[in-house]
Image (tube, grey):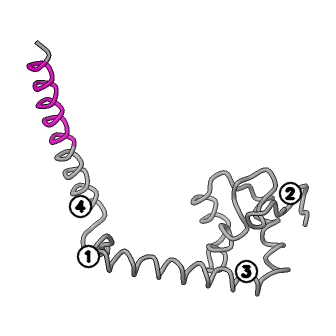
Amino acid sequence: MKTDQVKIVDVGREPQIEGHRLTVLDVFYYLHRGYDFDFIHRAMPSLTRAQFDAVVEYVHEHHDELVEKDRRVEERNKQGIAEQKAKGLYHEIDDSVPVEERAARLKEKLGQRLQEQAENNGKNSARHSSTSC
């Protein structure tokens, strides 16, 4: 497969852009959901227009196969999320809370954890210095 010197190759992982880590399926995920090059380029800044065009050409030739692969990936993702929820490891994002507020909460939690770690490190170093005298 070749478009403007960009080749789609399969080196054992999945079809991918030659010389690039992006696979066709990485780009197809967005294409299949109706996103255009500009959006996809913002998500994958290293993707050039020529590379994108090569993927689009490949997609036209292998559409049904890619749709099936995408379906299986989505199924695996849903299964993984269900398993994490069952273990109590997955929490839904509350979309009613603005992004800025969620970010502020995360920063506050991170600050608390860092402070706790610093306090614990201080206690540990004090213990070590008193035992080494």
**Label ID, residue 6:** 2
Residue 66 x, y percent position in the rendering:
73, 80
Mark earlier in primary sequence (1, 2): 2
Mark 1 residue element: loop
Give the quarter of the figure containing the N terminus. Answer: bottom right
Q: Which residue is under mark 4?
A: 101
**Residue under the image location 25 percent in, 55 percent down:** 106
User: Above or below — where is 80 with respect to 6?
Assistant: below
Give whichever of 117, 68 is nearer the camera.
Answer: 117
The answer to whether 71 appears left or right of 63 in the picture is: left
Nearest to viewer (mark 2 / mark 4): 2
Mark earlier in primary sequence (2, 3): 2
Mark earlier in primary sequence (4, 1): 1
Give whichever of 89, 129 is nearer the camera.
Answer: 129
Q: Say what amino acid the circle numbered 4 marks.
A: Glu
Spatial CA distance of label 1 from label 3 is 34 Å
Q: In terms of image quadrants, where is residue 47?
A: bottom right
Q: Which residue is under mark 3?
A: 66
Nearest to viewer (mark 2 / mark 3): 3
Residue 122 x, y percent position in the rendering:
14, 29
Residue 14 x, y percent position in the rendering:
74, 67
Q: Which residue is under mark 1?
A: 96
The answer to whether 80 appears left or right of 106 in the picture is: right
Nearest to viewer (mark 1 / mark 2): 2
Q: Magenta stretch?
A: 114-131
